[in-house]
Amino acid sequence: MRTRGTDMRARGWWSWLARAGVGLGALLAAGTAQAQEARPWLDPTLPTPRRVDLALGQMTLDEKIAMVHGNFGSILKKTRPDDKRIGAGHVPGVPRLGIPDLYESDASLGVANGGTMRPGDVATALPSSLATAATFDPDIAYEGGAMIGAEARAKGFNVLLAGGANLTRDPWNGRNFEYLGEDPWLTGVMAGAAIRGVQDNGIISTLKHVALNAQESGRYVLDARIDQAALRESDLLAFQVAMERGRPDSVMCAYNKVNGDWSCENDWLLNQVLKRDWGFPGWVMSDWGGVHSTVKAALAGLDQESGQELDREVYFGDPLRAAVDQGAVPAARLDDMVRRILGRLFDRGLVDRPAPDMPQAIDYAAHGLVARRAAEAGAVLLRNEGDLLPLSTALKRVVVIGGHADIGVLSGGGSSQVQAVSGTPLRLPIPNGPANLGFIKITYHGSSPLAALKARLPGAEVTYLDGSDPARAAAAARGADAVLVFAEQWRTEAIDLETLALPDGQDALIAAVAAANPRTAVVLETGGAVLMPWLGKVGAVLEAWYPGDQGGEAIARVLFGEVDAGGRLPLTFPAAEAQAPRPRIPGLENVKAAAAAQASKPRTPGATTVDITGGVQAFDVAYVEGADVGYRWYARTAREPLFPFGYGLSYSRFRHGGFAAQGGAAPSVRFTVTNTGSRPGVDVPQVYALVPAADGKPVRRLVAFKRLELAPGHSATVTLPIDPRLIARFDADGAVWKVTAGLVPLVLASHATADGPTARLSLPALSLKP
Ligand code: BGC
């Protein structure tokens, strides 16, 4: 999707020429030809490697060095206060050669502008990535990415820090809402589609954070320890699939160490896996404050230092120049860094069709619908006793409680924060939040579920209570035709959740209201899994995640059955914290001790360097579950979760049949789905293979899925390919994926622990490239 607009300055100039009777086409052609003669790398008909060689041949050492390190965006705020393109980062271009500046913005859920909060600087906020993952629909992920890319381009950005694809290993990770769940195949497919959507606007997306940035506590200091083969079969597989499908031009390395080396100076991760095994042609940029050395990082495969003010020193500035002068970093390696960047700029069109200098008009109404569709399609119906939902518009008395439903919907915090088009009715400071995270606020988008519900109940008495007094709420709920409790769990980058319980007494509130009226539906606005001690007492539960710019409207449409609740869980909801592979946050004590020490220290006025580690002592995190992330861990350890991966109800009913597997080197499955209910509905059939886990016990792995919308009585027969790597084991010694010849049991199911039709897939012995 590309938003067309008009560059006002250009329009003035062009219309003057037209009035003067100058033939515009002829003039442009002559000008372009001249420019190309003088600067032949600007000739779009030349192949990219040739253009790169030509441009590189003209660059001075200073210009090369300038291209491989960039500023934290806040510097731009000071140096170019009027520039609308203030995002997370900026890398100056080479104007004399026609190489553009890189204007970088965070973009997980929209063009992130939460940090600047400039009046009027709004952008369309998608629902959280978990909601998009819950749609199990790569087309929806693509549309979201395309929408963000269109807005970013219209605002003048040309590099988006999108493409978050870390697997959810721990249910309490503060940033789970920004990722796509716990399964490598689902994550890879969805991230790849979103990245493709962004880049189809002629701008660049990252894939991030490589690798194992699986928790926020101590992310700047921790060492993630894991078996290499297990990492290939899990987090790296997700990145690999996303890379193959999305072809991101850039990859962002993570803050943490992986097996002893910082991710941004990890030769195995960057040189061997990413660039050698996967043939990644683009450039590796660091996370902001993720660089720790010059020579080691440059030789290990880092191509660009980002947000340099957050590092201890500008490692890829003067120190890199000195290292090249002294031969510690070969000049050819610096050229390789620059080649990787230039190649992507030429290929993606950043040079030939640059993002505009002046902001362009954006069709926010159309983009709002993209956000709304994703929110609706990703809403997961977890419980619906006696068909309490969908609600009827004929209800006479409805009580709505809590969650600030009168003003809007919750969003997740951190660098992905979007200042939504629908408004920002409330921004609250983090209670007892650390001083260095003052920029992060608990932020609501201005799409009120209460208003959307009232609009559908014109003849009814609809009452709202904020939920602060459970007894009052219960009294109001008694005898109502339906009660809707909105419950919230806020998550943010930089902080993990110490408990999965709903905060601020919401459990007691829900229990009291449900005891007063069993026709109580709970709408959850959470950034991941949450505990539900009241589950058996309530009539219905709808997981709406952080539903984005039009969240209120999307929730109402699902509650009233204007659309089916079509989402399925992209991650396991544990029954208790103790079920998770790490029931407690590793290193939390270190984080708390450092925070206490910081709080007692006076701030140094005028300090120019920041220690983003906050003084936290380093620690290791052992990923004992290895490749068996999420539902595979629950299966391997025979733990029964509250809700399994893939779970979700529909307002209709479905039958699965005709399940058959086609073996060989390019295997596939085929099956038929029939809507046997009386309403149109969404089904998400999932195919799992039984593959031996690390301990030899067979455990399910998701190998195929399909979101289907079917009218009542209608059937669809689908054929889905199976990527043999999903069934293979990674042989770290031989550096190959290995499939053993034999019959692999498959099940067609509606979630990770459900039964269903079975088949056997006959596979030959296969050795697949890493
Ligand atoms: C985050 C990245 C983000 C960067 C720039 C970092 O703290 O981890 O995801 O892109 O900041 O804002």
Image (cartoon, rainbow, N blue to C red):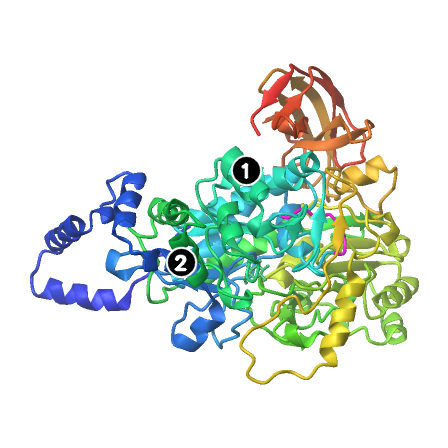
Q: What's the mark number on residue 312?
A: none
Q: Is residue 196 magenta?
A: no
Mark 2: few, some, or many residues within 10 Å (few <14, many ≥20)? many
Position of 377 relative to 74 (above/below): above
Coordinates of residue 101 in the picture (x, y in percent)? 36, 61
Q: Residue 610's image quarter?
A: bottom right
Mark 1: few, some, or many residues within 10 Å (few <14, many ≥20)? some
Question: Which residue is drawn at the image coordinates 90% and 74% (left, top)?
Answer: 471
Given the image, on which type of amino acid does mark 1 rest? Gln
Q: Secondary structure at mark 2?
A: helix
Quarter of the rendering occupied by the C terminus? top right
User: Looking at the image, in which quadrant does ligand 1 appear?
Assistant: bottom right
Coordinates of residue 385 in the picture (x, y in percent)? 84, 49
The CA distance from mark 2 to mark 1 is 25 Å
Q: Nearer the viewer, residue 76 or 544?
A: 76
Q: Which span is picked out in magenta? A: 166-172
Residue 563 shows up from this direction = no
Q: Quick one: label 2 or label 1, which is nearer the N terminus? A: 1
Q: What residue would you read off at disc 2?
A: 321
Q: Nearer the viewer, residue 556 or 90?
A: 90
Q: Main secondary structure of the magenta part?
A: loop
Q: Residue 431's image quarter?
A: bottom right
Coordinates of residue 54 in the picture (x, y in percent)? 25, 45
Q: Is residue 564 left or right of residue 200?
A: right
Q: What's the mark number on residue 272?
A: 1
Mark 2 in CB contact with mark 1 (< 8 angstroms) = no
Count up the numbered dots: 2
Q: Residue 549's image quarter?
A: bottom right
